[in-house]
């Protein structure tokens, strides 16, 4: 399963008011594992950035002056996301801006473009968070606090940084690590060769037992408290 965690920064809040995308940041997950195949691009919006938006993301008009236009990057961007499930926080905002950019291109050129929903499926983590944590704050900062994710390095919004943080949030919201892989290319499986499961000798030495430290028990209990906010924790029955 290929998923793209995506975020954008823009000149303002409403594409209908002529606002444009100025940054796209994406990280790739395959089978819920980060691959390192990121996509990151700044874009010249051909208009000024609102002062209020600059206060949020810190991206100035001067910085964007020499960046490529959306028409210059659209091919690589669409090829990157095509066929994936997009994981986006408040997806209607980002998808709306992307579709608006594609509509502008169609008006300016003879080309036609599929809309996001025609190329990808979309999972909105804001909607998911509202279902899991009704009545609570569910912005990205609040979710980081709730799931114990360190985002202290996030002084300003940035599309790639926010996509990286959202990938951590999403994996924890949907169950964290889902499997322990023992495939032949991931270390642990290499020692098994072609023999599969190995039986231990009957006259082996007793296995040593390593007890959890007090600090480890405290961390474990904290995680169970977080899980207990939404469901019964079977480890405490």
Image (tube, rainbow, N blue to C red):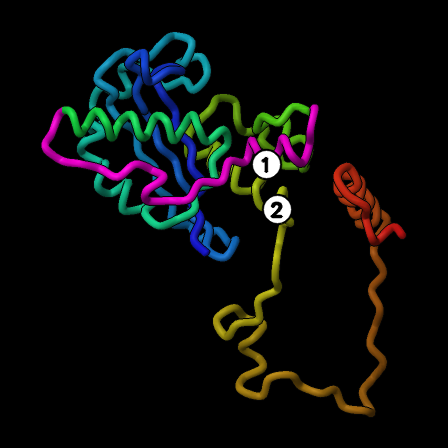
Can you name the residue that lies furthest to the left here? 110
Quadrant in which residue 21 is drawn: top left
**Disc marking residue 128:** 1
- Location of residue 116 in the rendering, given as x and y in whole percent from the top left corner: 34, 38
Residue 133 in magenta? yes
Foreground label between 2 and 1: 1
Instruction: Please indicate whether residue 100 sits to the left or right of residue 2 in the image.
Output: left
Instruction: Please indicate whether residue 104 sits to the left or right of residue 155 in the image.
Output: left
Foreground: 103 or 65?
103
Q: Which residue shows up at 85% across the image and 80% down it? A: 206
Residue 121 in magenta? yes
Start and end of the magenta stretch? 108-135
Q: Which residue shows up at 49% across the image and 40% down it? A: 123
Quadrant in which residue 51 is drawn: top left
- Location of residue 236 in the rendering, given as x and y in whole percent from the top left corner: 87, 50
Pointer 2 residue: 174
17 in relation to 121, above or below? above
Disc 1 element: helix
Q: Are marks 2 and 1 in contact (CB under 8 Å)?
A: yes
Foreground: 46 or 211?
46
Disc 2 element: loop
Number of other residues with Cα within 10 Å of mark 2, as a class: few under 14, some 14 to 19, many 20 or more: few
């Amino acid at each position: 399963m290929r998923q793209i965690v995506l975020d954008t920064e823009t000149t303002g809040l409403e594409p209908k008011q002529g606002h444009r995308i100025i940054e796209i940041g994406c990280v790739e997950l395959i089978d819920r594992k980060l691959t390192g195949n990121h996509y990151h691009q700044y874009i010249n919006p051909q208009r000024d950035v609102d002062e209020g938006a600059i206060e949020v993301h810190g991206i100035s008009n001067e910085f964007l002056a020499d960046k490529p236009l959306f028409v210059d990057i659209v091919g690589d961007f669409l090829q990157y996301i095509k066929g994936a499930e997009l994981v986006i926080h408040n997806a209607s905002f980002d998808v709306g801006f992307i579709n608006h950019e594609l509509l502008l291109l169609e008006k300016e050129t003879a080309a036609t473009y599929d809309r996001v929903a025609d190329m990808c499926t979309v999972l909105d983590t804001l909607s998911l968070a509202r279902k899991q944590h009704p009545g609570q704050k569910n912005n990205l900062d609040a979710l980081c606090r709730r799931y114990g994710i360190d985002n202290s390095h996030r002084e300003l919004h940035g599309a790639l940084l926010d996509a990286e943080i959202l990938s951590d949030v999403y994996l924890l919201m949907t169950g964290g690590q889902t499997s322990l892989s023992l495939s032949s290319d991931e270390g642990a499986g290499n020692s098994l060769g072609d023999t599969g499961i190995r039986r231990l000798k009957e006259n082996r030495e007793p296995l040593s037992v390593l007890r959890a430290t007090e600090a480890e028990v405290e961390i474990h209990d904290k995680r169970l408290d977080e899980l207990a906010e939404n469901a019964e924790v079977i480890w405490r029955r």
